[in-house]
Image (spheres, rainbow, N blue to C red):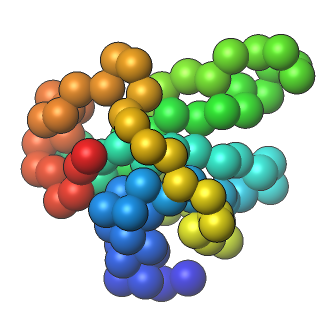
Amino acid sequence: METSALDETVRYAISTRHYLAYATPEGKGRVVAPHAYGITPEGEYTVVCWRFDTGRGPSAPGDWELVRLDEMREPRIVDRTFQTPRIGYRRGDKRLRSIFAQL
């Protein structure tokens, strides 16, 4: 998927509160609730998201993570939505110098 299509996918997922699925560069599947999308001070296009599967076992809790767009493989919108932001989310995330989309 080219960058502009991925950009549109991420923006759509945030604006409609859809879950986003993708594979890591190592081929591991991820499902996340994207909350913000922007660019870091280092110039990396990044998504602030809540990841449900931490990869630490079936009972491991989810966690916040920053995912660079160039690390997302085969991204797709999941046919499920979430209603509210996760606890701990704050608009205007300071880890992003510019924000393109956010809840």
Q: Is the residue 48 above or below the residue 10 in the image? A: above
Q: Is residue 20 above or below residue 34?
A: below
Q: Position of residue 27 (x, y in %)?
A: 80, 55
State the image quarter where residue 85 is shown. Answer: top left
Query: What residue is shown at x 39% (from left), y 37% (from top)?
Result: 84
Task: Indicate left or right for 25 with 84 as reference.
Answer: right
Residue in view at x 36 percent, y 44 percent: 35
Residue 99 lies left or right of residue 75; in this view the side is left
Say which residue appears at 24% left-offset and 49% top-offset: 102
Q: Position of residue 20 (x, y in %)?
A: 57, 58
Kindly tell me whether residue 66 is visible in this rendering.
Answer: no
Quick one: 40 or 49, which is closer to the camera? 49
The residue lying at 73 percent from left, 32 percent from top is 53
Where residue 18 appears, as percent x and y from the top left, is 50, 58
Exactly how many numbered labels are in the figure? 0
The N terminus sits in image quarter: bottom right
Q: In front: 82, or 76?
A: 82
- In the displayed structure, 1 sits above or below 68; it is below
For residue 58, side relative to residue 69 (left or right) = right
* Percent coordinates x, y for residue 73 in the rendering: 64, 66
Looking at this rendering, what residue extends furthest in the front direction? 83
**Does residue 68 show up?**
yes
